Image: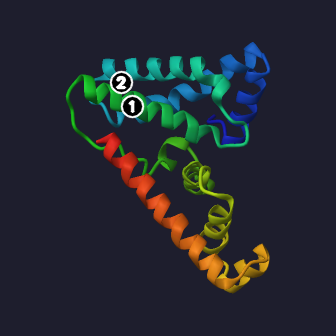
Amino acid sequence: MIASETELRAMMIASQEGNAPVYRRLLTALRPRLEIFCRRRVSDASAAEDLVQETLMAIHIKRDTYDPGQPLTAWVYGIARYKLIDYYRRHRKHQSVPLDGIEDFLGETDHGFAAADARMDVGRLMQDLPAAQARAVQLTKLEELSVAEAAEQTQSGISSVKVNVHRGLKTLIARFQKSEEENV
């Protein structure tokens, strides 16, 4: 039986608190998901098994960095994806590693996965924006309030909200482009 996201998260939280038997159950529950993930992307069964082992080791080493408020599977597949990229680099294979269709690996439909992943990415990008810009972008672009509604909530003028949204988006786009250039 495949554990749900909620069960996996509970196991990870318990393991972070020092529950070794639950931690072993967590790794056992994650293994089949990781095997499917790796085997669908690497044709060599031995290499796929190595990737699973490397991913489980990375999970073990980095388990204290997991934020219990975030989906565990997003964190796990992020680690697996980086291990896969490292494998491709070592073997000079240039392939994209899409995260589309990740529900196939969850063994269930996880409708919140993509949204949670996007929220984490946006949160990281916006964390260094000035507060007024971050709030204006949050209200108008993410919560889809009108500029007038955002101005009312922030107790500022409409033009101030427009300026903050413009400057915030300009900064976010520049950061995104810079990070894309660094990853190439």
Describe the element under mark 1 as helix, strand or loop.
helix
In space, the residues marked 2 and 1 are separated at their CA atoms by 5 Å
Q: Amino acid at mark 1?
A: Cys
Kindly indicate whether the residue at mark 1 contacts the one at mark 2 (C-beta within 8 angstroms).
yes
Give the secondary structure at mark 2.
helix
- Along the polypeptide, which appears first: circle 2 or circle 1? 1
Q: Residue at x 65, y 43 (%)?
A: 71
Looking at the rendered structure, which numbered label has been put on residue 38? Answer: 1
Label 2, residues with CA under 10 Å away: few <14, some 14-19, many ≥20: many
Across and down, in percent, residue 106 comes to 55, 43
* Relative depth, front residue between 88 and 49: 88
Residue 144 image offset from top left, x and y in percent = 63, 76
Dot 1 surroundings within 10 Å: few (below 14), some, or many (20 or more)? many
Q: Amino acid at mark 2?
A: Ala
Along the line of sight, the residue nearer the viewer: 143 or 78? 143
Q: On screen, 169 above or below 106?
A: below
Give the number of callouts. Answer: 2
Rendered image: mark on residue 48? 2
Q: Quadrant of the C terminus?
A: top left
- State the residue in front, 18 or 39: 18
Going 71% across and 82% down the picture, which residue do you hit?
157
